[in-house]
Image: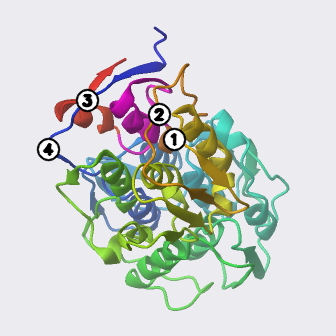
């Protein structure tokens, strides 16, 4: 069997999963701590490849990171390309950070990230490129920064997090119908906690000596799909829109929680059925997550009707064992959904290591709870 294929066998799970720390909180605190000259210790229970990529890039820019402690400083010119791997958040945050530098920095990532556009952020920062590989820095940032928030909240968050490194105040404004609003709200709240007063006004970042990160609420969807509990459920205030999982209705608006698309759609097929809407921006993730979720569910014999911004699922469906290898298109949330469906009927899943992007111990934990998984 290929080393990139997981063989999943029907299994019964017993016990609880432990969620990794919130990737969204981790990345924002890393950027802010990198701007604070005083050391900040960030307590992270488990970090995936996306967070590790950001840490590695910050180190290339002269930020010291030792055993969870960040020592912030001015950025220095790196000797090599900054490779952010698969992480869209790390890419957008670093584009804005590097735009404040008086030297050019080249940024790149994996094939899936090369297909994703950062056009609106690059335009706001007067950068010529739209997709990686691209150069940021050695440009004049305009005084009026208008950003479209209709496709992603990451662009606005990137500008807010870069403001402390800017040489003068800027006017930051938004256009479009905002998505993932809880994520941009989190960014601004953390900025305020470290001294920010208003959008676009540089401030001296003052982080707490220690920062404790909550669990990643988006990963609750996989526990729910698997029908098991977690040992460290996040609070509603830290759930960043993912508390929609517990609303108990048959219509789920994922305008602020598009990461839930694959596991929630699968869960609704197996249980009560329902409608997912407001998730058009999920088509701009690692894969076209709307199209690929339909493909994934069909491979397990599950019926789903796609709309422009979501799906309709009939409930109480029974999954079937796929006839071939289930494709996951480099998308960790598709892979993790496929793994859990495979525990019901058996399956061969493409992308044996994809879960490591956000939850490195996912397969190991499932195995400890009784899952029969063979690499």
Which mark is nearer the camera, 2 or 3?
A: 3
Evaluate if marks 4 and 1 touch, with contact meaning CB atoms under 8 Å apart: no
Give residue 197's position: percent from left, percent from top. Answer: 50, 91
Point out the tag, 4 or 1, that comes first from the N-terminus: 4
Point out the tag, 1 or 3, that comes first from the N-terminus: 3
Point out the tag, 2 or 3, that comes first from the N-terminus: 3
Evaluate if marks 2 and 1 touch, with contact meaning CB atoms under 8 Å apart: yes
The quarter holding residue 339 reads top left
Q: Is residue 236 magenta?
A: no
| Magenta region | 335-359
Label ID, residue 354: 2
Circle 3 residue: 11
Query: Could you say whether the residue bearing mark 2 is in a helix, strand or loop?
Result: helix
Q: Residues within 10 Å of mark 2 (few under 14, many from 20)?
A: many
In terms of depth relative to the viewer, which is nearer, 282 or 142?
A: 282
Circle 4 residue: 15
């Amino acid at each position: 069997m290929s080393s990139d294929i997981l063989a999943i066998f029907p299994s019964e799970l017993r016990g609880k999963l432990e969620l990794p720390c919130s990737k969204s909180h981790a990345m924002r605190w890393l950027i802010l701590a990198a701007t604070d000259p005083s050391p900040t210790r960030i307590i992270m229970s488990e970090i995936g490849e996306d967070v590790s990529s950001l840490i590695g890039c910050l180190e290339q820019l002269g930020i010291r990171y030792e055993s969870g402690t960040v020592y912030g400083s001015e950025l220095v010119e790196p000797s090599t390309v900054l490779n952010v791997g698969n992480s869209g958040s790390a890419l957008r945050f670093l584009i804005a950070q590097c735009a404040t530098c008086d030297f050019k920095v080249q940024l790149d990532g994996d094939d899936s990230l090369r297909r994703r556009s950062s056009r609106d952020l690059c335009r706001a920062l007067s950068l010529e490129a739209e997709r990686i590989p691209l150069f940021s820095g050695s440009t004049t940032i305009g005084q009026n920064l208008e950003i479209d928030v209709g496709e992603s909240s990451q662009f606005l968050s990137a500008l807010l997090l870069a403001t402390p490194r800017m040489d003068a105040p800027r006017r930051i404004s938004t256009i479009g119908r905002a998505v993932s609003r809880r994520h941009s709200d989190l960014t601004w709240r953390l900025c305020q906690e470290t001294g920010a007063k208003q959008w676009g006004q540089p401030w001296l970042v003052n982080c707490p000596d220690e920062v404790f990160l909550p669990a990643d609420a988006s990963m609750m969807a996989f526990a729910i799909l698997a029908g098991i509990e977690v040992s460290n459920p996040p609070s509603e205030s830290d759930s960043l829109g993912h508390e929609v999982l517990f609303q108990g209705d048959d219509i789920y608006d994922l305008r602020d929680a598009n990461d839930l698309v694959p596991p929630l759609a699968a869960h609704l097929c197996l249980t009560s059925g329902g409608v997912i809407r407001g998730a058009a921006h999920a088509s701009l993730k690692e894969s076209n997550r709307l199209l690929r979720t339909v493909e994934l569910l069909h491979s397990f014999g599950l019926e789903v009707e796609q709309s422009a911004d979501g799906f309709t699922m009939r409930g109480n469906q029974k999954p079937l064992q796929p006839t071939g290898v289930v494709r996951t298109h480099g998308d960790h949330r598709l892979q993790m959904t496929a793994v859990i469906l495979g525990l019901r009927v058996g399956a061969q899943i493409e992308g044996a290591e994809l879960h490591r992007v956000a939850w490195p111990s996912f397969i190991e934990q499932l195995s400890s709870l009784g899952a029969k998984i063979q690499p």
